[in-house]
Amino acid sequence: MPAKVVVVGSLNMDLVTRAERLPRAGETLVGQSFATVSGGKGANQAVAAARLGAQVSMVGCVGDDAYGEQLRSALLAEQIDCQAVTTVSGSSGVALIVVDDSSQNAIVIVAGGNGQLTPEVVSGFDQVLQAADVIICQLEVPLPTVGHVLKRGRALGKTVILNPAPASGPLPADWYASIDYLIPNESEAAALSGLPVDSLASAEAAAGHLVAAGAGKVIITLGPQGSLFADGTRFEHFPAPKVKAVDTTAAGDTFVGGFAAALAAGKNEAEAIRFGQVAAALSVTRPGAQPSIPTLSDVQAFSPA
Ligand code: RIB
């Protein structure tokens, strides 16, 4: 029986344009392409965990619009259990994404149905949390809901992962004791710690700060530089496989979902980090959020250049 990963978080329809570069304030650019793609950090992490070997349940909300149906169908197509994906009145979450020729992106999200994932809604699906081995949250749903899930996950004795994305400032101090693995990227680590993160040394300082705040273990993802692990006794840098990036959207989500799936399957932390990094590296070689996420056999077949 595959181990069970439960993702509590967002589902967004991504409205993706490609352009030579990101527009400046007040500027109109002529783009190269447009696509609607299933995304949302929560749903992307659920798809990653499912494609990479875990049995997955999603807890979230979609609107009663066409996007809501498409977002649910995309998860069902991956054999993800959607009994806890509630349809609410109004629009689904959307993300407006511009990807430039250097594969970087800029994203604006509008919460839509994600904003209606309250602690009460999640409490109605407590049996889904109870069945989990690993629980993952992000920050695209209301913060009281994230706080509820972290604490409930800890009370149930589950492995709890928080991907604090997007982050605009410090986390509530009383969350830290419920987090086994805190997985920010560089800018999120800076927002959480109040320290600049622009080098391995500064990432170590920020990770040390977050462990001291009470997070069990911290993994700062560093894009093409890999990731930094910290647990209060040591730091370890994991270099990333080298690939040619075309679109970095959902790379962090693929890492988180892959790390969780590997951990749930019994791999140790170092193995799970390397596995997540290969999955994330493969994802940046393909466009889009969920369409870019590799399968277990893609990862197993990967050999570094
Ligand atoms: O992490 C990538 C995701 O961020 C996109 O799919 C978009 O929906 C935003 O939530």
Image (tube, rainbow, N blue to C red):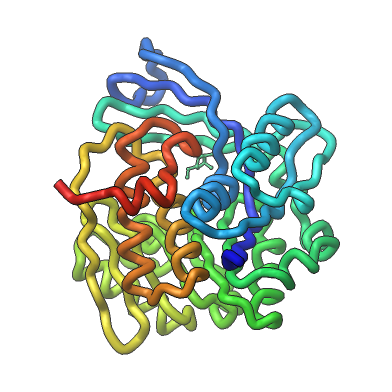
Considering depth in this image, is 17 or 168 the residue closer to the camera?
Answer: 17
Outermost residue toward the front in this view: 1
Question: Does residue 304 appear to the left or right of 298 in the view shown?
Answer: left
Q: Residue 78 placed where, x, y %?
A: 60, 43
Q: Measuring 21% from the left and 50% from the top, which residue is drawn there?
A: 303
Out of 256 and 146, give the one closest to the viewer. 256
Image position of 178 with respect to 265: above or below: below
Camera-side residue of 155 and 49 = 49
Q: Quadrant of the N terminus?
A: bottom right
Along the line of sight, the residue nearer the viewer: 101 or 283: 283
The residue at 39%/25% (across/down) is 25
Residue 196, located in which quarter of the rendered image? bottom left
Relative image position of residue 154 (x, y in whole percent): 64, 80
Q: Position of residue 57 (x, y in %)?
A: 67, 56
Whether residue 167 is visible, yes or no, is no
Quadrant in the rendering for residue 135: bottom right
